[in-house]
Amino acid sequence: MKTIYQKIDQSEYRMTPQRSVVLQVMLENQGQHLNAEDVLAKARSKSPSIGIATVYRTLEKLAAIGVLYKNMFEGGSYRYELSIGDEHQHHHLICLSCGSITEVEDDLLHILEERLENNGFQVVDHELKFYGYCPECRVDK
Amino acid sequence: MKTIYQKIDQSEYRMTPQRSVVLQVMLENQGQHLNAEDVLAKARSKSPSIGIATVYRTLEKLAAIGVLYKNMFEGGSYRYELSIGDEHQHHHLICLSCGSITEVEDDLLHILEERLENNGFQVVDHELKFYGYCPECRVDK
DNA sequence: TTATATATGATAATGGTTATCAAACAAGTG
DNA sequence: CACTTGTTTGATAACCATTATCATATATAA
Ligand SMILES: [Mn+2]
Ligand SMILES: [Mn+2]
Ligand SMILES: [Zn+2]
Ligand SMILES: [Zn+2]
């Protein structure tokens, strides 16, 4: 289990002021799923001249080395979130009514992954979304 | 468990020649994950004047009533496939090396879903992707 | 038929993401 | 230091999948 900084050190990732700001934004918004525009706005409050291209490039790089998860929910844009302590991506509960996104730490995919490994598929990561109705939105009580 | 035709009948879905052609294309390409351009090309061989807008509209409608699954894999476009017999979407194994997509019928999410239901989240469907290396691409043997 | 609603296809518009490129910056050389 | 070389940045153009628009066509209702 590598830390964020181990991941960065072990990559060919040069820390620049802009990249540092983007990383800071992600650290300060743990648990949220931000898209590039969100990150740009928050980054500009720290470093007003940062451009959207740099934000995209940095998010992409951080996702490539496993510091961020990149996910597509509804809305047509990719959303990023910090990956700390998770070996594998956690799961998401997506409410079909209010759109809220809740995390599930519970893994429980080990049994399934073990079965896949036995069939020759080497599992690196997974992505699991549950669609349904959150406690506030469910109708049947 | 409704059949495709039951789903269509129970919707406010009017069967037109164009929609019929799109449905036919999906039926004839079971197991494949086609994007709108793929469907357009195959549909045009049956009905040359069909337009891309109608294809998008029809795929969207068929997905809304549960006849198709709509999924985003790599490549930047949504891909559609027939949903027959599956109450829930099946899982996908995506090879990080060759990009091949394999199906997993095995559900095994019941335990997890039961736990979520007990916590108040009403599960409607799920989407599970495993990323890793297929038997041909894995290195460690 | 006539009226009304829905569906279609061409094409324009949208919008998130990527590519381009000149300028800025960093790192190494002697 | 001056010089070279390579990397990063930000503005902006290009890309491209998808959606919106709208006039025409087609189906349904009266
Ligand atoms: Mn999350
Ligand atoms: Mn599939
Ligand atoms: Zn909700
Ligand atoms: Zn492979």
Image (cartoon, coloured by chain):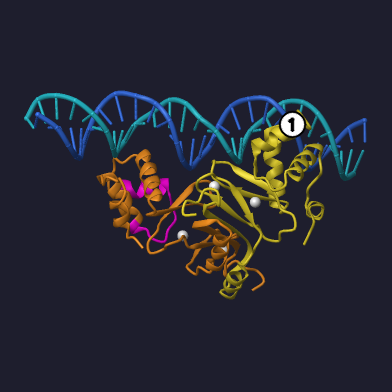
Chain colours: A orange, B yellow, C blue, D cyan
> In the rendered view, would you say B28 is above or below B64?
above
> In the rendered view, would you say B67 is above or below A2?
above
On screen, residue B15 versus residue A31, left or right, reads right
Where does label 1 land, which residue?
Answer: B44
Picture quadrant where residue A130 is located: bottom right
On screen, residue D5 versus residue B59, left or right, reads left
Residue A37 in the magenta stretch? The answer is yes
> In the rendered view, would you say B5 is above or below B35?
below
Image spot of residue A58 (x, y percent): 35, 45
In depth, the one of B19 and C5 nearer the eye is B19
Mark 1 burial class by Cα count in 10 Å: few <14, some 14-19, many 20+? some
In depth, the one of B53 and B138 nearer the eye is B138
**Disc 1 within 8 angstroms of ligand 2 (CB):** no
Which chain hosts label 1?
A: B
Q: Give SS at disc 1.
A: helix
Residue B72 in the magenta stretch? The answer is no
**Span highlighted in magenta in the image:** A27-45
